[in-house]
Image: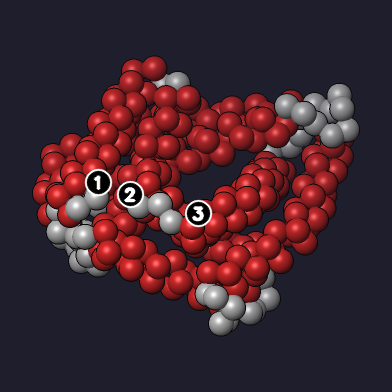
Amino acid sequence: MNKQEIGEYLYRYYHKRTASFLANIYKASITTDARDIHRARLDVKKIFALYGLFEMLDPTAFKHQGGYKLFRPLYRQAGKIREIQVMYLLLSNPQPPGVEYDSFKLWLKERERHSVRKFIQLVKKFKESELTETDKVIKKICYSNSIVKVRSKTEAYIEDKAVKVNEILAAETGEKEIHKIRQHLKMMSTIATLVYSIKSGKQLDLIITELNKTEVMIGDWHDRVVLKDAVSRFLAESDPKSEEELENLNRLNQSLADYNQNLELHFMPEVKVIMQSVLGGNE
């Protein structure tokens, strides 16, 4: 692709995502269906990946106009709804079999209703005019960069993230630090995947494959951290219907902690290997 073709591709890809986002949030405002809200959230994830690329090419891109702050409130609220959906899925296959968490599920359902109402309020406040202003900034960036610059900036960006991950790994890592590692890995993966779609390359392909494999495990870990935290909040705020349910919830929390401890033993060494691969064994 030449500069003109790259610009056209990026700009059209961005417009496709924003158009899909607008369609999904307005549909969600009518249906209040969590699935429509989740589709809008997936659109924003792709928009954020593009923003990461644009910001990488021009660090001042969103200094004065829109950007992340335009979408972040909706994205975060949609994320809360998605987390509850994932918790329902984890609870749908309880261990041991036959265990029910009636009071906890009712508590989750009320939180979901509250989150959906708040999401709809945010949709009504969303300023599409600010999105139009941001488009002007993005169009200029799209048509001003060659594939050579995009690739070189991508390599520098990924290496910088790898250095940051290594700095975290060098210290004692708890849940907070693993969350940060997960964020860095996701940013590396999204940027690499986007640039790979413009210009494929063996190194990028390898990085994407390794990151995606590890991200699945860390995503699994994160889902259980969220559920464990929710159970703890429920127990602090409410009373289960019975002693049996209280015991079941305490057992659930312990099983989630044990499962995640085992997962960490698997994915943390893999993260170190990937970072060494990205940095060419220099770190």
Within-10-Å neighbours for mark 2: few <14, some 14–19, many 20+: some
- Could you tell me the amino acid type at mark 1? Leu
Q: Are marks 1 and 2 in contact (CB under 8 Å)?
A: yes
Report if residue 12 is visible in the image.
yes
Q: 146 above or below 161?
A: above
- Could you tell me the amino acid type at mark 3? Asp
Q: In which quadrant will I find the C terminus?
A: bottom right
| Distance from Cα at disc 3 to Cα at disc 1 | 20 Å
Report if residue 103 is visible in the image.
no
Tell me the residue at 29%/25% (across/down). Answer: 23
Residue indicated by mark 2: 198
- Could you tell me the amino acid type at mark 2? Ile
Tell me the residue at 25%/46% (across/down). Answer: 10
Q: Is residue 227 left or right of residue 201?
A: right
| Distance from Cα at disc 1 to Cα at disc 2 | 9 Å
Residue indicated by mark 1: 10
Which disc is residue 205 wearing? Answer: 3
Within-10-Å neighbours for mark 1: few <14, some 14–19, many 20+: many
The picture places residue 184, in percent across and down from the top left corner, at: 50, 62
The picture places residue 103, in percent across and down from the top left corner, at: 72, 29
Between residue 213 and residue 18, name the one nearer to us: 213
Q: Secondary structure at mark 2?
A: helix
The picture places residue 165, in percent across and down from the top left corner, at: 55, 71
